[in-house]
Amino acid sequence: MVDDPYLFGQIAAANSLSDIYAMGGRPLLALNIVCFPNCLPTEVLGEILRGGADKTTEAGAIIAGGHSIQDNEPKYGLAVTGLVDPQKVKSNAGALPGDILVLTKPLGTGIINTAAKGELASEESIKAAVENMAALNNRAAEVMAGFNINACTDITGFGLLGHAAEMARAAQVSLEIWPGSVPLLPGAMDMAAMGMIPAGAYSNRDFLAGQVRLPEKVSPEMAAILYDPQTSGGLLISVPEKTHEAMLKEMKSRGIPAAAVGRVMKKGEILIELA
Amino acid sequence: MSPKTNIDCRGLSCPQPVLQVKKALDSITVGTITAIVDNDTARENVSTFARNAGYSAEVEKEGSNFKITIVKGSPVSGGETSSIGPAREGEIPIVYLITSNILGQGSPDLGQVLMKSLMVTLNEMTPPPLALLFLNTGVMSACEGSPVLEQLQSLSSKGTAVISCGTCLDYYKIKEKLLVGRVGNMMEINGYLTGDARVITVA
């Protein structure tokens, strides 16, 4: 989807840095890990690394070195080390019944990526998806640090429902997700209806078989989006009901497209209910 | 004879099978496309695409492959293939592109009366139109409060595809109020406009 090596580097870095933010930490230093073919010009590699370096700088961290190997296709990621006050580590295991679940980025990058490969995605969709993937979760994490939240994880390859299920299992609770409230990238629904659904979305669905209750009113397209693997997705935060509005308000005032997308319930028969 | 096309999508990864099927469907007005796919992702994506594009799709398992049969020209009604499909062989199907909820310039009241009159007339056409494509304020016709809901419902039950532009529904914040037909995107609408049907624009 991303042909621009500089953007590719930025997205890979934002994705790598995200775990640190999801734990309530701040990134300190990063090591480049690069696979690169000898048939591509080295300028391309330079641009990838520049994208990674700029994103890492934006995050307030430094690149301390790295490793490179020759491979058939370009791959890039970073091993990131961060700092967090042990008293303030956010785990994915603390969700409490009554909490509200807040998601800080829209969904649909996997679907739009697939549609872009098929040259069916609109420019508007691609632009929004690329900006979404390249955006750091740093500001959302900063806002989150000001509130007494109970759990946090970041949304990546297992999709919203996959990562939500991990959160539910870890805390021995069930979750209710509100599909109508989930923020979507422009075009995601249309592209899902066109059958531009990546294989990963089906794997995620099959992996969660029997653990998610899908009412009939939830369209297959919406379900595909909820299972869609995300690249550099947002944070999913479990926040006490009484403070969630204040947190959402502050996120919105800082331009973060966050929304309340569900709530935590006592452990029931089913891990995730879609309401 | 309506043409039959076979597409071998084995070994192709997502989204190629959908693109191949879409290309084949776009190239015909009436006919049957049979696609062979070798994985569940392709099976589900091709079926999803066909269903949302308004075609009937049947999946059969053939060894480790799936055979998906898609019929264009006889739209799905209630899960069954209608025998009174609009695009009969030898007749040029007609598509109406409707970009306003009233017909013509001038008095809005008159425009509304004329629109209703048009919809009543379309119901008397044999065969009924292949599709009604609603854009801009046209989408209001298919939503709650529209004076032509009954006529649209009746056309839809005769097999006419009633498609409202999703962007337009979002813009006027009435997606929840859509009562007849379904949401479509510009690509699908453009597919109808550039297909073999005769297009009549109502503005």
Image (spheres, coloured by chain):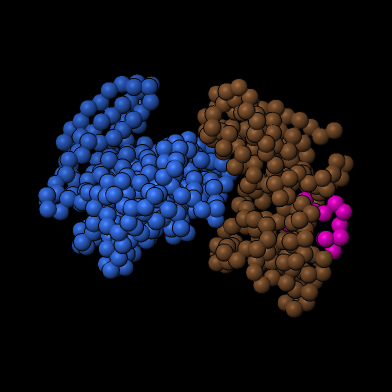
Chain colours: A blue, B brown
Q: How many marks?
A: 0
Query: Does residue A240 belong to the magenta stretch?
Result: no
x then y, percent, for residue A15: 31, 42
Q: Residue furthest left?
A: A86
Q: Residue furthest front?
A: A269
Query: Could you tell me if residue A231 is visible in this image?
Result: no
Residue drawn 68% across and 61% down?
B180
**Above-or-below relation of B40 to B128:** above
**Above-or-below relation of A59 to A181:** above
x then y, percent, for residue B203: 73, 65
Picture quadrant of residue A4:
top left
x then y, percent, for residue A158: 38, 41
> For this view, does B119 lie left or right of residue A34?
right
Stretch in magenta = B121-132
Residue drawn 76% across and 30% down?
B4
Residue drawn 39% across and 49% down?
A269
> For this view, does A274 lie left or right of residue A79?
right
x then y, percent, for residue B201: 75, 59
Query: Does residue B125 belong to the magenta stretch?
Result: yes
Picture quadrant of residue A176:
bottom left
Query: Could you tell me if residue A163 is visible in this image?
Result: yes
Front one among A249 and A32: A249
Picture quadrant of residue B121:
bottom right
Residue drawn 73% across and 45% down?
B80
Q: Quadrant of the N terminus of chain A?
A: top left
Front one among A58 and B25: B25
> For this view, does B202 lie left or right of residue A61?
right
